[in-house]
Amino acid sequence: MFLFAFVEFRRLQDIRKPGSASQDPIFTNNKLPEGEVGYPGGIFDPLGYSKGNMETLKLKEIKNARLAMLGFAGFVAQWYTTGKTPLQNLSDHLSNPWATTVLSNDLARL
């Protein structure tokens, strides 16, 4: 947790004052060019994911995050209506597919 907090704190520093976190605190020879912010991309990018059109990559990341939030809302709605986790519901459906369906609980019939 400490490492995550450190990384997010450095990112917050760079957002508040661009260029303030442009040098790696451990490996001081790693430094960003003047005027370039360290996030996203930045100094540490061993797989080269920040290469290319950053606007397109940011848009893709936002779309994926929205889709993940929608999927989580589906998990919550499923738990609220059935009182079981998605894996328990899947197990119930696979054990008896004709009797355990989306219409078999009482809240789905409203």
Image (spheres, helix red, strand yellow):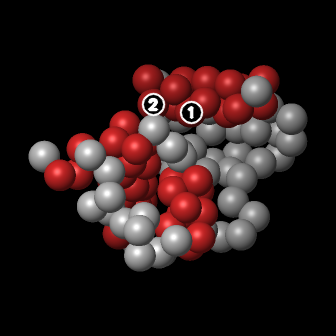
Residue 49 x %, y %: 60, 68
**Residue 73 appears in the rendering:** no
Residue corresponding to mark 1 = 11
Residue corresponding to mark 2 = 15
Q: Nearer the viewer, residue 63 or 48?
A: 63
Q: Which mark is residue 46?
A: none
Q: Is residue 99 left or right of residue 31?
A: left
Residue at x 37% of width, y 66% of height: 101
Q: Are marks 1 and 2 in contact (CB under 8 Å)?
A: yes
Residue 98 vertical position relative to residue 22 in the rendered view, above or below: below
Q: Quadrant of the N terminus?
A: top right
Residue 89 x %, y %: 51, 57
Quarter location, residue 68:
bottom left
Give neighbour class at mark 1: few <14, some 14-19, many 20+ (Cα, 10 Å): some
Q: Amino acid at mark 2?
A: Ile
Residue 83 vertical position relative to residue 41 in the rendered view, above or below: above
CA distance for labels 1 and 2 = 6 Å
Residue at x 83% of width, y 39% of height: 28
- SS of the residue at dot 2? helix
